[in-house]
Image (cartoon, rainbow, N blue to C red):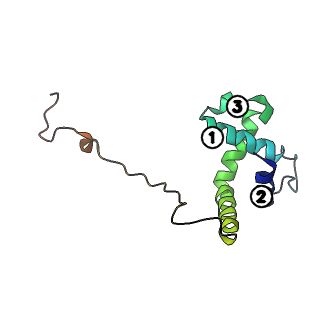
Amino acid sequence: MTDAQWRRLEPHLPPEKPWTGHPNAPHRRIIDGILWVLRTGAPWRDLPARYGSVGTVSSRFYRWRASGAWDRILAALQAEAEAAGQIDWDLHFVDATVIRAHQHAAGARRDGAVGG
């Protein structure tokens, strides 16, 4: 992640230092590790050591997903970009629609015959 990208993202992240307990690993290093996994499609176990331990990086990703942090971060960044006139909603959108088809819709014979 570039320094400019980090400056836009950092204000929207949860506090790096919790009120109690052990301090978190630096958000920037962890997010870079998450982005590496997402970009490469590699399994968590192949995460390079420079991003921290696999457990730390994956745990942060899943905790933030469960808490809704990623959704809040995306909404805040989109609101900033829209206020600055940087988003054309006719062009930029994400569609996560999934349509599942019954197995018979995939070309199975309708007469109940097996084989073919």
Rounded to the nearest angstrom, the CA distance separating label 2 from label 1 is 20 Å
Is 80 placed above or below 59 here? below
Q: Nearer the viewer, residue 37 or 88?
A: 88
Kind of residue at disc 2? Arg
Front disc: 2 or 1: 2
**Farthest residue in the bottom direction?**
83
The percent coordinates of residue 45 (x first, y second) are 67, 29
Residue type of the residue flagged with mark 1: Leu
Mark 3–mark 2 Cα distance, whole angstroms, equals 25 Å
Disc 3: CA contacts within 10 A as few (<14), some (14-19) or many (>=20): some
Q: Mark 1 or mark 3: which comes first in sequence?
A: 1
Report the amino acid beneath label 3.
Leu
- Measured along the vertical axis of the image, is residue 12 above or below residue 111? below
Q: Residue at x 65, y 58 (%)?
A: 68
Q: Residue at x 66, y 55 (%)?
A: 70
Q: Quadrant of the N terminus?
A: top right
Instruction: Bin the neighbour count of mark 1 within 10 Å (Cα to Cα): few under 14, some 14-19, many 20 and up.
Output: few
Q: Residue 8 bears which disc, if any? A: 2
Q: Mark 3, mark 2: which one is toward the viewer?
A: 2
Query: Mark 3 or 2 closer to N-term?
Result: 2
The answer to which of marks 2 and 1 sits earlier in the sequence is 2
- Dot 3: what SS? loop
Left or right? Give the position of 72 relative to 2. Answer: left
Left or right side of 81 for 18: right
From the viewer's perspective, is residue 99 above or below residue 93?
above
Residue 7 seen by the camera:
yes
